[in-house]
Image: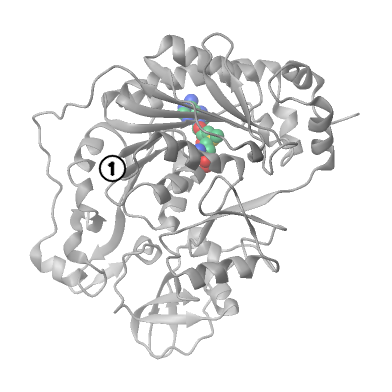
Amino acid sequence: MSSYLPSSLLNSLEGLPGFDRAAFEEVHAAGERVTSLRLNPAKLQDKDLAEKVLQSLSPVPVQPVPWSQHGYYLPQRPSFTLDPFFHAGAYYVQEASSMFLEHAIRHSCDLAQSLKVLDLCAAPGGKSTLLQSIISAGSLLVANEVIRARAGLLADNISRWGAANVVVTNNDPRDMARLPGFFDVMVVDAPCSGSGLFRRDPAAVEEWSPESVALCSQRQQRILADAWPALKEGGILVYSTCSYSREEDEAILDWISMELDAENVPLPVEASWNIVTTSSGKRNCEGYRFYPDKVKGEGFFIACFRKTGGGAWQPGKRKDALPALSKKDRVKLQPWVQNLEELYCMAHQGDVILLPPGMTSIVPVLQQHLYLRKAGIKAGQLTAKELVPDHQLAASTLTAATVPRVALTREQALQYLRKEDPAVQAAVKGWALMQYETMPLGWAKILPNRINNYYPKELRILKEI
Ligand code: SAM
């Protein structure tokens, strides 16, 4: 069969577990588009609302992604840009195979514990939002991205997700070595040659070459070696790629097993999922291959290890305290934030940052060693008179029930999200949350004869209908 896939790629995959050349070429030639998303359980505790979100996206009942609690397939791809629920952080559009990270974490970690989790290569945030949804409220996720512009995108996606127990950092993997034994879990969703996404993005084939596979393989080893010291003894490493190439998959498992103090953690996989269990040639480490001709999803590879040496983080003598908000200023936050007494309010360059109490001893350590792009939820800026609320507060799950709200229709919501003035008669005055189907979209200030739209300019919808 003729195909747009490079023959050097196809030839290199011959003999790999589960590789069926004819079926593989056929599924790429057919070019079916699989669409899937993961709901945000923190924002959709109301089951009826969750149902409403799914129904608004699909005229027929949606099918669950078998290895993810909140993942669903959609029968077709709607315009997410024109869906107010998307902007409200009701869900994250994520490729289904990569949601298997959830299964890997559930089977290798005790999620009831307060864990420190590092997502090392995190932008745009698919795996980070997944991790945030499955860790406990007392756990902390550090979502890191080395490329600055991509770290900005990651921070926006984390803000939209709305959780307070996340820190976004913008560091090179080697900087993580400044935190020896710090993390309980480390996810390395490594930059790779990207063959797993060829069905979804045939143009990406142009960038593929055997040389890029070799380069990626070297880089993957470097990234793992650089960040490895930051994982504590007994901690879990999850390694994944969206490449089919042995050099980036099984060969890396052998390298991890030989070069790092790590033991492979096999995962249970149901036969009906059609995921192929593979074993690395030299050290018999198990990994899991996802082929689009076998699973309903794109190409993916994942494996899990436990660290067997290296000890755990020893906190230094230096005890930096975060600057706390004065009692007087805390009072100003009362009308805005629910359960304020359970949160730490930090004063930071005129802003107020809300942190879960478990993070107060961790954030100073991170601040000392890494470049923090975002930590917790920015409540806003305190002026002499009032709080000027930040978009992060609107997008969070922390706003007090007493904050005035304005219900928008879908049309009005889209006007608001385009940063136009939503044609709405509001009964309230002053700062108000603009909502779609009870989900906050952002702030507006209601004045006697107009509404000032405070939706962040950089997030506004640009696309015309
Ligand atoms: N985990 C992300 C998700 O689920 O949305 C996707 C991550 S993507 C496969 C790999 C990421 O690694 C990219 O964001 C890329 O910018 C970053 N990256 C590129 N070079 C890197 C390097 N040398 N060290 C660490 N990360 C790198």
Q: Residue furthest right?
A: 1
Instruction: Please tell me which residue lies in front, 55 or 443.
Output: 55
Q: Residue 242's quadrant in the figure?
A: top right
Query: Cβ(mark 1) to ligand 1 < 8 Å?
Result: no
Question: Could you tell me residue 288's position as x and y percent?
Answer: 58, 29
Q: Is residue 250 above or below residue 200?
A: above
Can you say whether 161 is above or below 194 in the image?
below
Please state, as top left, top right, bottom left or bottom right, where the C terminus lies in the image.
Answer: bottom right
Query: Residue tagged by mark 1?
Result: 113
Which quarter of the rendered picture does the N terminus lie within?
top right
Residue 283: percent from the left, percent from the top?
A: 51, 11
Indicate left or right for 149 with 138 as reference: right
Q: Residue at x 67, y 62 (%)?
A: 79
Q: Secondary structure at mark 1?
A: loop
Residue 190 can be seen in this image: no
Q: How many C-alpha atoms fall within 10 Å of the one at disc 1: few (<14), some, or many (≥20)?
A: few
- Regarding residue 462, the answer to whether it shows in the image is yes
User: What amino acid type is highlighted by mark number 1?
Assistant: Gln
Question: Residue 167 appears at what percent x and percent y?
Answer: 33, 45
Task: Identify which residue is drawn at 84% across, 38% down.
Answer: 29
Q: Nearer the viewer, residue 274 or 159?
A: 274
Judge left or right: residue 440 versus residue 76.
Answer: left
Q: Image quarter for residue 399?
A: bottom left
